Image (cartoon, rainbow, N blue to C red):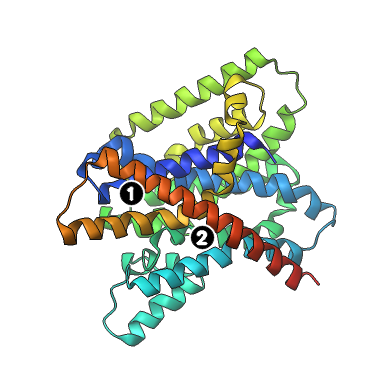
Amino acid sequence: MINTLTSLRFLFAMMIFGAHCYVIDSFFDAHFFKEGFVGVSFFFVLSGFIIAYNYQHKLQENKISKRTFWVARIARVYPLHWLTLFIAVILGNYVVASDCMDWLKHFLASFTLTNAYIPKADYFFSFNSPSWSLCCEQLFYFCFPFLIPLAKTYKRLLYLFIPIAIIVVTGMYFTPEDEIKGYWYVNPVTRFPDFIVGMLLFHLYNFLKNKHITSRQGSAMEIISVLFFLSFYLFASEIPKVYRYSCYYWLPVAMVLISFSLQKGVLSRILSNRLLVTGGEISYSFYLIHLFVLLLYAEWQKETNFKIAWYISIPVLFCIIILLSLLSYRYFEKPMNQKIKSLFNK
């Protein structure tokens, strides 16, 4: 496990949290917060890197089977997804359906993580809306074992990535504004290049990890990558949003990931703090739970017409989400993960 990358998961999950806080107060309507959706791009690129880091050599050397890999990923994704889906059903939120059959279609699409393939917001954002990204992860995990022959060298992956990237950028240019979210933000097929970027980074990591990099050099790499990312982030409003949904952030996210994966600098030592690592470990629970809490509070605030200043309510809500995430991770996510793997790997 690379502790620094685990901690980064928490920091980028917090950015997604900040992007959704606009439901509480208009203060969070500012670009600085709403651009936090870049956290999703980070997770997709990170997924490609971490999956390659953990499984590429094992699959290449036949130390594990495709079945074992897929079971591990199903055990990771589905239990908490289904739990939060049923919570959303109980709460009666997040879907607009004309009749019972229409509701059932939405439910089955969310249940099977196929809702993001349908370019309609009432599908891909139905029920627990952050779960759309799991549709993308599901496609990545399904395809990864079949990419192993291409993953032997970075050149083969580049031959796959470059034409796909050209098609993506060209397609983005010709897509009408009101359709970009359905086709370029949530669609698993068009987010696949993010995952390949992560796989390419793993090759770069293998090249760099045994190089002699001093603490000073490592610190410089980390600081430069953070500043580079922030420059892209803060000036993103000048770039059409369709590109910011993925390709615009490929390079800055890649620089952050590769510099911190080496764990050579002073910032890496800070990110290796156990509290931050724990935050990264619970980031999946945090991601799937946070919007429930924010929307429930927003609804209560609207019904009661009782407004608490955001600088009080947001920290309190954040602490509640952290607590719920810790409980979810400790008493549901981890036990269910182990049970499913032991059940299907017999």
Q: Name the foreground residue: 4 vs 118.
A: 4
Q: Amino acid at mark 2?
A: Leu
**Label 2 to label 1: alpha-carbon separation:** 18 Å
At 37% from the left and 49% from the top, the residue drawn is: 172
Q: Residue 194: give x, y in percent of width and height.
A: 53, 47
Q: Secondary structure at mark 1?
A: helix
* Along the line of sight, the residue nearer the viewer: 240 or 260: 260
Disc 2 packing (10 Å; few <14; some 14–19; many ≥20)? many
Residue at 51% across, 73% down: 112
Res 243 seen here: no
Residue 77 found in image quarter? bottom right
Q: Which numbered disc flags the more N-terminal residue, 2 or 1? A: 1
- Extreme top residue here? 216
Location of residue 307 in the rendering, given as x and y in whole percent from the top left corner: 18, 49
Estimate how packed mark 1 is, as few (under 14), some (14 to 19) or many (20 or more) residues with alpha carbons within 10 Å: many
- Where residue 296 appears, as percent x and y from the top left, is 31, 60
- Mark 2 element type: helix
At 73% from the left and 53% from the top, the residue drawn is: 148
Residue 151 appears in the rendering: yes
Image quadrant where one finds the C terminus: bottom right
Q: Point out which mark residue 134 bears.
A: 2
Q: Nearer the viewer, residue 7 or 134?
A: 7
Q: Which residue is mark 1?
A: 20
Disc 2 + disc 1, Cβ < 8 Å: no
Residue at 14 percent across and 56 percent down: it is 305
Q: For the residue marked with disc 1, what is the amino acid?
A: His
